Amino acid sequence: MALMVPNVGEVEFLTRTFTYEGSKLKLYTNDYTCTETSVIGNFTECAVAGYTHKTLTGTISAGTWTISTATLITTASYPEQEFLPTTAVSCYGYMVTNSAGSTLLFAERFTGAPYVIPAGGGSIKITLNIVGD
């Protein structure tokens, strides 16, 4: 039997899930698609000049995670985060890890991956939106 979160519990569930303090948002550069058995070791974090991971604040408030419900669909959202590599790199997606960077929490491959930053640098912007139904 699969885990079921009923509509009445979605907001509470997402609020408790995303108040995890200090998780890390990171870009990855290897050609990989996350599966249910993926672990942090399956990903190669970006390591070029100008890149640094983002630390996510675990509070639920303006400017951090927000939880909303519309027509029985609950969404957890985090404001846009911008990465600014200053040298060439190809990024295939992003991952979110625990604060120690030792456990993979979730990951997403970019549509049309890879996203290529040219030699002169550029930016990658990510807005996290996790949708329950």
Image (cartoon, rainbow, N blue to C red):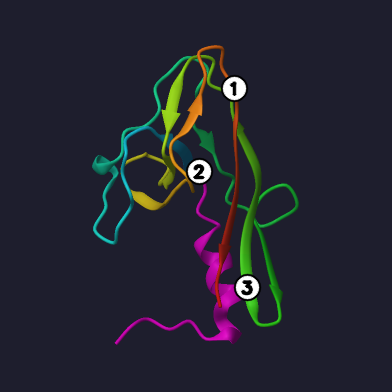
The amino acid at mark 3 is Thr
Q: Which residues are magenta?
A: 1-22
Pair 3/2: label in front = 3
Q: Earlier in the sequence, mark 3 or mark 2?
A: 2
Please name the residue shown 53% across and 35% down the image: 54
Please name the residue shown 47% across and 44% down the image: 112
Quarter containing the C terminus = bottom right
Q: Earlier in the sequence, mark 1 or mark 2?
A: 2
User: For this rendering, which residue is in front, 27 or 20?
Assistant: 27
Residue bearing mark 3: 74
Residue bearing mark 1: 122
Q: Are marks 3 and 2 in contact (CB under 8 Å)?
A: no
- Considering the numbered disc 3 on the image, is that residue within a helix, a strand or a loop? strand
Residue bearing mark 2: 22
Quarter containing the N terminus = bottom left
x then y, percent, for residue 51: 50, 23
The amino acid at mark 1 is Gly
